[in-house]
Image (cartoon, rainbow, N blue to C red):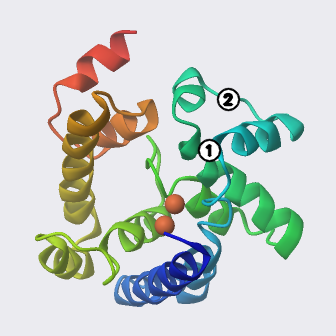
Amino acid sequence: MGQEDRYAHSLRVAETGSALARRHGLDADKARLAGLLHDLARLYAPARLIAECEARGMTIESFERAHPTLLHARLGAAIARERFGVEDPEVLSAIAKHTTGAGEMSPLDCVVYLADSLEPGRKFAERENLLQLALRDLDAAMREVLLLTLRHHARKRGSNAPPALAAARAFGVHWPEEARASAS
Ligand SMILES: [Fe+2]
Ligand SMILES: [Fe+2]
């Protein structure tokens, strides 16, 4: 995805996120703002992601060093604050957690996470049904999307990010790799 596609994706995440927020009685403006800004650092090369995080004194976990693209979420939150003056901790949290999820997620975090996965530009068979589910039940949609995502990454790179496993645990997703990750 290039710059223009990334921008179009961000607009769709903003729209989808604000629709989900409205449906669940959350602040649609916060969801929209988080959606617009969530991928600010997505097009940075791996070396730049690491350098920019280090320059800000951010901790970089070993899994993030191995998969620097993950850093675009937390770095994106930092850039949203620095360049766009976003100080709202709920919006910054939603940006920071949009890629992997986390062991603790607010409803707004879930809305942005789900909007990122389920916006209409995403092309996978379950998308429309999962979006309908998300409009009815955020937790149920989180369980389904987390499970799909864990399976996808297990197939693609043979492992999952610790925060994604923590999210799976928090939402009660049955995932065997969880046991291994929590033991290490
Ligand atoms: Fe992203
Ligand atoms: Fe995204």
Pick whichever of labels 2 and 1 is earlier in the sequence. 2
Foreground: 53 or 169?
Answer: 53
Foreground: 59 or 23?
Answer: 59
Q: Where's residue 170, x and y in %?
A: 33, 41
Taking the spot 81% from the left edge, 44% from the top edge, the residue there is: 52
| In the image, farthest residue toward the front | 2
Residue at mark 1: 71
From the viewer's perspective, tell me whether residue 72 is left or right of residue 22. right
Taking the spot 26% from the left edge, 49% from the top edge, the residue there is: 149
From the viewer's perspective, tell me whether residue 131 is left or right of residue 73. left
Taking the spot 61% from the left edge, 75% from the top edge, the residue there is: 3
Q: Residues within 10 Å of mark 2 (few under 14, many from 20)?
A: some
Taking the spot 68% from the left edge, 54% from the top edge, the residue there is: 44
The residue type indicated by label 1 comes to Leu
Residue 148 seen anywhere in this rendered image of the structure? yes
Residue at mark 2: 60
Mark carried by residue 115? none
From the viewer's perspective, tell me whether residue 57 is left or right of residue 76. right
